[in-house]
Image (cartoon, helix red, strand yellow):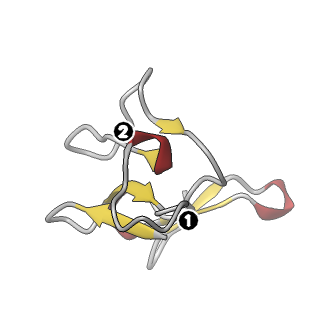
Amino acid sequence: MGVYGDHLGNIRLSYADANDDGSVNTSEIREEKNYYPFGLQHKGYNNTITGREHNYGFNGIEHEQSLGLDLYEMPLRQY
């Protein structure tokens, strides 16, 4: 599995070469995320296409969903 990130370290696209042909087409994209300047995700076209959602989002911050917490693990605070 590969990821494509931007200059801030945000993971924008997750993909995998499922058929091992050396190229990735649109059917092999697993997840796409787009952000506004301060971290809010765009609505309507951020998709988990196949597979599972990636846990790391804006600026590499981990979204913790275990135990029903639904919070963001920041270095000094949790939101």
In the image: residue 56, left or right of residue 13: right
Of circles 2 and 1, the one toward us is 2
Disc 2, SS: loop
| Residue 77 image position (x, y, % from top left) | 50, 70
Quadrant (top left, top right, bottom left, bottom right) of the C terminus: bottom right
For marks 2 and 1 on the same chain, the one whose residue lies earlier in the sequence: 2
| Residue 38 image position (x, y, % from top left) | 25, 45
Real-space Cα distance between discs 2 and 1?
A: 16 Å
Crowding near pointer 1: few (<14 within 10 Å), some, many (20+)? Answer: few
Q: Does residue 33 sit above or below 53 in this rendering?
A: above
**Residue at the location (32% across, 46% down)?**
39
Q: Quadrant of residue 21?
A: bottom left
**Residue at the location (48% across, 50% down)?**
28
Residue 30 visible at all: no
| Residue 10 image position (x, y, % from top left) | 30, 61
What residue is disc 1 on? Answer: 78
Q: Residue furthest bottom?
A: 75
Q: Does residue 45 sit above or below 41 in this rendering?
A: above
Residue 9 visible at all: yes
| Closer to the camera in the image, 30 or 47 | 30
Amino acid type shown at disc 2: Leu
| Closer to the camera in the image, 10 or 24 | 24
Crowding near pointer 2: few (<14 within 10 Å), some, many (20+)? Answer: few
Q: Which mark is residue 40?
A: 2
